[in-house]
């Protein structure tokens, strides 16, 4: 918030701080698509249950993992274009995505919730 207020008059300077190339911003939006599908499925949970289409919940964990892997690959692509120069913002993004990936792969809770939702109610 402080950074956005500091660069209020010149938003393009703030964008180049996080995304050296303007196309990097658009590439970084691609991993949002699988996560958006997960969000839509979760928000429509009751409607899906009533229509007895519980099979739609099966790919939730896989879509979450795909979104995280895509985010990591986009961040690594950006870092490779800047010759792996130190970037706290991209490093933090990769770290958070890796933590989410480990959680998604190891979480028994996520698997149990999806398996429970898939069962007939």
Image (spheres, rainbow, N blue to C red):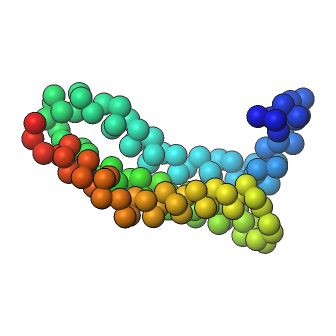
Q: Position of residue 119 (x, y in %)?
A: 13, 45
73, above or below 2, in the image: below
Q: Which residue is drawn at 20% across and 51% down?
A: 115
What is the tally of numbered marks visible in this picture?
0
Nearest to the observer: residue 77 or residue 120: 120
Image quarter of the C terminus: top left
Q: Which residue is drawn at 37% across and 64% down?
A: 106
- Which quadrant holds residue 49? top left
Side (left or right) of 43 relative to 75: left
Side (left or right) of 85 relative to 110: right
Q: Where is residue 103 in the image (x, y as percent from the top left)?
A: 43, 59
- Which quadrant holds residue 12? top right
Side (left or right) of 45 relative to 2: left
Image quarter of the N terminus: top right
- Residue 77 in view in this figure: yes
Q: Position of residue 110 (x, y in %)?
A: 32, 52
Q: Residue at x 34, y 37 (%)?
A: 42
Extreme-left residue of the structure: 120
- Which quadrant holds residue 47? top left
12, above or below 8, in the image: below
- Residue 74 in view in this figure: no
Side (left or right) of 46 relative to 83: left
Nearest to the observer: residue 5 or residue 107: 107
């Amino acid at each position: 918030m402080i950074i956005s207020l500091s660069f209020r008059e010149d938003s393009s300077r703030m964008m180049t701080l996080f995304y050296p190339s303007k196309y990097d911003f658009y590439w970084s939006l691609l991993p949002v698509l699988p996560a958006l599908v997960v969000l839509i499925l979760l928000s429509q949970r009751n409607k899906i249950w009533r229509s007895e289409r519980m099979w739609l919940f099966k790919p939730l964990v896989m879509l979450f993992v795909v979104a995280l892997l895509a985010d990591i690959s986009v961040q690594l692509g950006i870092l490779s274009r800047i010759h792996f120069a130190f970037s706290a913002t991209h490093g933090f993004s990769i770290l958070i995505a890796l933590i989410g990936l480990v959680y998604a792969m190891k979480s028994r809770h996520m698997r149990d919730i999806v398996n429970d939702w898939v069962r007939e109610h």
